[in-house]
Image (tube, helix red, strand yellow):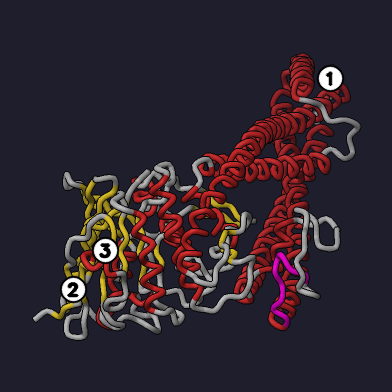
Amino acid sequence: MGNLLVNTVSYIGDKYFYNSPEFTQGINIIEGENGNGKSTLMNLIYYCLGGDVKSFNSTHSEKHLIITDDTNNYVELNISIDNEKYILRRSIGHNYISTSNSFGDIETYSINRNENPIIFSDWILEKLSISVLDIYQGTNSFKLNIKDIFRLIFHDQNPDPKKVFKSPDAESFISDSEYVRKLIFRMLLGKKFEEYYNSLGKLKKAENDKKVAQSLLNEFELISSQLYSDENEVLNIDHLKVEISELNDQLSRLIESRELLRIQRPIEANSAWKDIDSIKSSLLQIELNLQSKKDDLNKHYQDLNKYEKYKIGLIKEVTQLNKIIHAHKTLEIFSQNSCPFCHGELKREENNCYCGNDIKEETFEKFFFSSDEYWDLLKARKKSVETVDLVIDSTKKEIERYELIINADTEKSDFFRFELKNKLSHIDRANIDIDKLNEVDDKSLEVKNSIQNLEKKLDFEEKFLGYKSSFEKLDNLYKGFSRDTKILELTSNKEMESIVSDFNKIYDTFMTATLKNCRSAKIDSDSYDPVIDGGVYREASSRVSIRLNYFLTILKMSLDNQEVKHPKYLMIDTPQTAGLDPDELKKLLSQMIVFGEKNFQVILTTGHGLYPDEFKSNVKITLTDEDKLLKPRV
């Protein structure tokens, strides 16, 4: 799998600069007191590898003044991935990174996805042989990012000692959920998990596509029931084509019959009959248009009814969200795994509420957002109500327009009927069967109307069958992915049992060697969170050992098994937090001796001399108050 190595780090600006020495394989130590620039160096590396560093943002409340006040400044990394060298450059305050390979080929990638098909994260993950997975959680979906992977690579100065994973750059209910943390752990250590999750991504997409197709099919079925509610049966496509063909034959015969009746007219009456034919033709066209406009008007009334019902539902949801916000703001006790009354752990089956009633998952999930997220939902629903109001107003205007057109066409129809009747009353009836002629014309109009209606039904049925065929294909595709995913899930879970077992052996060895009161250490087989001595309380300083040994165990597993996707690279920033004794810190760091001369890299920042004596030759940089990281330009 891909191995990452940072060779050099440079910072270039108009006011300040820095060029690091060559970092090598193995352990690289940067020592110095607080405020000398140790964390700045780590943040520069992380920033140029696609991370977000809030202090580099000029609008942040705790900004890094030297960097944010500098101009034309950028970070440049010389890195190696599987012995292939690349130069990465990212300007401070900009969301793109340029890459250059050993041949001088330069590419520029955006940090954020937005409308960009390929971003920097995709590029570096591909180089590290890590798939860019589509991650689905509830109704949300996003792609795996290098920043997610760094949550188990960058051991930062976590302000919350209880957390093992690095906090996400944009923290939210979703990004820091147990589901996402488990996925990162499995992605880095599991060999079969990537195949399983790729299949799961395809399954989720197939499920979404199936739901869309099902919705379209249901909508067409609803329209069908409304259009044909007064008919005894709905004909299929073959029978509709046969009936249309028969009606066209009948219309041809009627036209021939009318032509024979026309030949019998007196010569002197030809001009009058031409006028009558013209009036009848105009009348026929208006009648056909009227029928079409009435059909369109009926559809607009149906749409208006549907929009008004949707608006009522939105208003109810706005009212419900207002109540939820009030309750959530007052109580702040809702979570998916605890009872809202006693706070005890609850087991809940999918698509079932705690009370046992059926409930949609997306509806259930509404109760577990933060207040800000509830407000966002409320604003979105209110905006939807405004949008529906605009649609309703537009539909009403369309209805008014159609009614005006229908009234105008009805008046024209009445006028032409009156003209027709007047013309016929003054024509010579000799040798002409007027009643028969009118009967043929009436029948022709009836047949044309029937053909027009059947052609509309045929068009509808063809679209309906298209939607039905699409749904059935997607349904079969979904079922196939579902079967494959279940098989891969079983295989992946079986593999993870073995991985957790291997992890526990290494982790227990590390923990018992560095934490004197620790008798046993493992991780929970479900959440992958550390469990020390069965979960008894530990002093805050012990969290340093618990967290750092977690990172070191993952690195050890990647060195022992080349199929593990962890890039064999760690960044450890000043681990002596939470009151850890210096001797205990040295003992903790000495664990890395077991890594030997294998192909890995650790960049460690720490205080002066706060590392094992055998690591003295690994010190690459010594920072002091007189010699800080960022140097001013003279």
How far across and how far down the image is residue 454, in percent? 76, 29
- Circle 3: is it few (<14), some (14-19), or many (20+) Cα within 10 Å? many
Residue 432: mark: 1
Location of the N terminus (image quadrant): top left
Left or right of residue 138: residue 29: left
Question: According to the image, label 3 marks what residue?
Answer: 28
Image position of 160 with respect to 250: above or below: below
How far across and how far down the image is residue 424, in percent? 81, 32
How far across and how far down the image is residue 187, in percent? 49, 49
Task: Measure the C-alpha gap from mark 3 to mark 1.
Answer: 112 Å
Total labels: the figure holds: 3
Q: Nearer the viewer, residue 474 or 242?
A: 474
Residue span colored magenta: 331-339
Q: Nearer the viewer, residue 87 or 542?
A: 542
Q: Quadrant of residue 41?
A: bottom left
Are discs 2 and 3 less than 8 Å apart at CB?
no
Instruction: Say which amino acid is labelled 3.
Output: Asn
Image position of 518 with respect to 554: above or below: below
Q: Earlier in the sequence, mark 3 or mark 1?
A: 3
Residue drawn at (75%, 24%) of the image: 237
Q: Tag 3's secondary structure?
A: strand
Instruction: Say which amino acid is labelled 2.
Output: Gly
Question: According to the image, label 2 marks what residue?
Answer: 13
The answer to whether residue 276 shows anywhere in this view is: no
Residue drawn at (68%, 34%) of the image: 479
Q: Nearer the viewer, residue 524 or 342?
A: 524
Q: Earlier in the sequence, mark 2 or mark 1?
A: 2
